[in-house]
Image: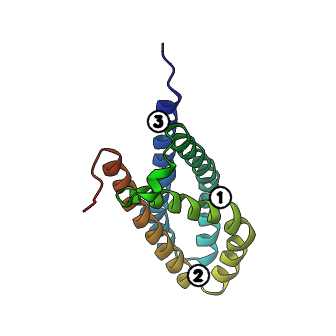
């Protein structure tokens, strides 16, 4: 059996993105709308924090695996020069989406956003959950465009001249 680490990395990369962005889609399209319909603000906050805390662990792990596998593939394929080619815009997009989520999950959420959410949700839960939902929609939309671009681009559709 020929063990191909590049193929293994690609499989791990795709599975990690599926769990990571699939989770973001679930939070955005299912969890947040359901939480916003709850009547009691304390119930909203408690339920959202319970579910989001569990998802944050999955998101951190899959974001880490996505980054490690992605950078490994770039290294193995010596693909760094592709960043200078306009048709490979989706490499920039993938790296950018990954960097934004990594910053949010590993730095902003534990150091700033968790406390800010709790404080703002106590003051004005409707506004707080509306802002969170808008931000999730923005992140999900950019992520879906990036995934589509990456899949099409990796299969030869480069959107150049």
Q: Is residue 118 left or right of residue 2?
A: right
Mark toward the start of the polypeptide (3 vs 2): 3
Specify the label residue 53 is tagged with: 1
Decide: is 91 above or below 11: below
Q: Secondary structure at mark 3?
A: helix
Q: Is residue 32 left or right of residue 46?
A: left
Residue lying at the far top in this picture: please name it: 1
How far across and down, in percent of the image, does residue 82 sit?
A: 44, 52
Q: Secondary structure at mark 1?
A: helix
Q: Nearer the viewer, mark 1 or mark 2?
A: 1
Q: Mark 1 and mark 2 in contact? Answer it, CB < 8 Å.
A: no
Specify the label residue 125 is tagged with: 2
**Mark 2 crowd level (few <14, some 14–19, many ≥20, 10 Å Cα):** many
How far across and down, in percent of the image, does residue 103 sit?
A: 64, 64
Q: Quadrant of residue 123?
A: bottom right
**Mark 1 crowd level (few <14, some 14–19, many ≥20, 10 Å Cα):** few
Give the residue number, with chain letter if any, for mark 3: 11
Q: Mark 3 and mark 2 in contact? Answer it, CB < 8 Å.
A: no
Mark toward the start of the polypeptide (3 vs 1): 3
How far across and down, in percent of the image, does residue 139 sit?
A: 47, 67
């Amino acid at each position: 059996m020929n063990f191909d680490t590049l193929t293994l990395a690609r499989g791990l990369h795709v599975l990690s993105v599926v769990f990571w962005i699939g989770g973001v889609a679930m939070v955005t399209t299912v969890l947040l709308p359901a939480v916003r319909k709850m009547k009691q603000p304390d119930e909203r906050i408690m339920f959202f924090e319970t579910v989001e805390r569990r998802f944050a662990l999955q998101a951190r792990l899959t974001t880490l695996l996505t980054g490690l596998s992605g950078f490994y593939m770039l290294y193995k394929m010596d693909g760094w020069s592709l960043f200078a080619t306009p048709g490979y815009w989706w490499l920039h997009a993938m790296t950018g989406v990954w960097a934004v989520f990594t910053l949010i999950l590993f730095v902003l959420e534990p150091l700033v956003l968790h406390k800010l959410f709790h404080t703002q949700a106590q003051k004005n839960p409707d506004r707080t959950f509306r802002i969170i939902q808008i931000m999730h929609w923005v992140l999900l939309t950019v992520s879906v465009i990036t995934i589509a671009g990456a899949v099409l681009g990796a299969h030869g559709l480069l959107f150049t001249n």
